[in-house]
Amino acid sequence: MNARNYQKELDQILQMPATKGKKLFLHSCCAPCSSYVLEYLKQYFEITVFYYNPNITMPDEYAHRVAEQKRLIAEFNEMGDGYRISFVEGAYEPDTFFEVTKGHEHDKEGGARCYLCYEMRMRKAAQMAAEGGFDYFTTTLSISPMKNAAWINEIGERLSAQYGVLHLPSDFKKKNGYKRSIELSKEYDLYRQDFCGCVYSKREIGEEHGEIS
């Protein structure tokens, strides 16, 4: 059986005249990953960026990343093209991340711990999208070459059925999306972190560079 082409599915939705102006609740993992997604989708949707990332377990790191997200949105809105982008910051609750991933502290990056983390963040997005009367929800996570788009879309579809709000399919790394995010990060001088945010990914990066025993 052929793998699903989530980018093709998204293109089909975007080509529908009824899509124009629909409300999208977009979970964002960080400003660099959201940059291309916002540039791409703000022509079609009224977007509310939802910044909910309890996986960022260092407070200073969290504060830096959320500030970059707000700055990027403000700069995009100043351009005046496409729909205006709104912003909602979720609660900063790293204890929730530790509880959800308990028992998976030593998983390799990209394994079961990451799946649980995707689901945690996407569940909150789906819940709030439903409560807010949004037409769609999705996440920027699939732009990363390190993230499993099939997992992300499977989670999204399951949560869509549970909360009654449509999930927008995505594989944002396609159509040179990841490359474009790097270009936009340079253009807007965005902080690009080298780990996902949690202490476990930071530890793994440190071990790869011989910094942590």
Image (spheres, rainbow, N blue to C red):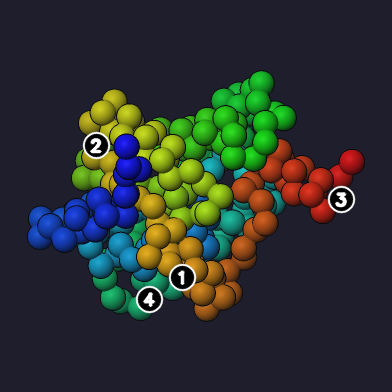
Q: Report, in whole angstroms, how far the alpha carbon at label 1 lies from the one at label 3.
A: 31 Å
- Which residue position holds label 1? 180
Q: Of the two numbered discs 1 and 4 on the same chain, state the one appearing first in sequence.
A: 4
Q: Is residue 90 above or below residue 112?
A: below
Q: Nearer the viewer, mark 3 or mark 2?
A: 3
Q: Report, in whole angstroms, how far the alpha carbon at label 3 lies from the one at label 4.
A: 43 Å
> Residue 46: which disc?
none
Q: Of the two numbered discs 4 and 2 on the same chain, state the one appearing first in sequence.
A: 4
Q: Of the two numbered discs 3 and 2 on the same chain, state the one appearing first in sequence.
A: 2
Residue at image point 28% right, 41% down? 167
Front-most of residues 3 and 124: 3
Q: Report, in whole angstroms, how far the alpha carbon at label 1 lies from the one at label 2.
A: 29 Å
Q: Report, in whole angstroms, how far the alpha carbon at label 3 lies from the one at label 2.
A: 45 Å
**Residues at circles 1 and 4 in contact by the CB criterion of under 8 Å:** no
Q: Nearer the viewer, mark 3 or mark 4?
A: 3
Picture coordinates of residue 123 (x, y %)?
Answer: 40, 33
Instruction: Name the residue type under label 4.
Output: Glu
Instruction: Name the residue type under label 3.
Output: Gly
